[in-house]
Image (tube, helix red, strand yellow):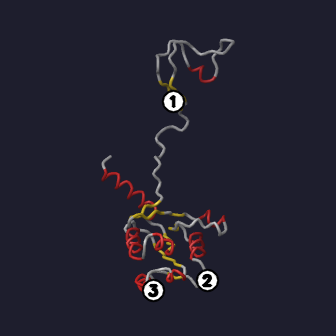
Amino acid sequence: MKKNELICFLENQERFLFKDKTILVDAANLILDFGGLENYINLIKKIEKYQPKKIYLLADASLKYQLTPRDTDRYLDLVAEGMIHECPSKTQADLYLIQMCVTIPNSAIISNDDFKEWEPKLVKHCKLIKFLAINGNIYFNINLKPKPNNNSNPNKITVKIPKFNSTITTKNEEPFGIEALYRTDIEKNKTIDIY
């Protein structure tokens, strides 16, 4: 595959994470891990290109105290515009993210949190999209494992026959199990399919 084809493959995997899903963003987690508010806004634009059903941005009320003065002003503007939903003081956005993910069909949370302090049966129900931010680029935990070949018969076993020219037998000279399928004078290294 050429590099452009590989990049297209990766983008399609990312698209699968977001397309037609309700995306719940742990804003504090992303803003603090992704290097500031401007990079965070670029990230949201990237996610929007994959056509999610809806994006909800939730932040702890304490986030504004962890930002630079410039980012704080922009953050407060985004809260006032309704772009970011600031949670009530002395509560964590995690609480609302989990509730929303459980109650909104086809939703996922973008966060690097593990949510261990919350009820496990609720967290288990949530689809979590983790990420890694490096030098202004973001990488999501997409599935890069090869897919099994669905065209093959799941009951099919391919056996490579060892190099011999006679039937395998037990002590009493009667073939058994798979060996019963072997015949005398089998070609060397012949492959057979067993169903």
- Tag 3: amino acid: Leu
Which residue was labeled with disc 1?
158
Residue at mark 3: 76
Tell me the mark number nearer the camera, choosing from 3 and 1: 3
Q: Secondary structure at mark 1?
A: strand
Residue 57 picture location, percent across and down? 48, 76
Q: Quadrant of residue 135?
A: bottom left
Residue at image mark 2? 90
Q: Earlier in the sequence, mark 2 or mark 3?
A: 3
- Is label 1 or label 2 in front? 2
Answer with the quarter of the image where residue 118 lies: bottom right
Residue 192 numbered tag: none
Disc 2 residue type?
Lys
Of callouts 3 and 1, which one flags the residue occurring earlier in the amino acid sequence? 3
Of 83 and 26, the residue lying toward us: 26
Q: Residue at x 59, y 16 (%)?
A: 168
Disc 3 secondary structure class: helix
**Which quadrant, please, contains the C terminus?**
top right
174 displayed left or right of 37: right
Tell me if I can see residue 107 in this picture. Answer: no
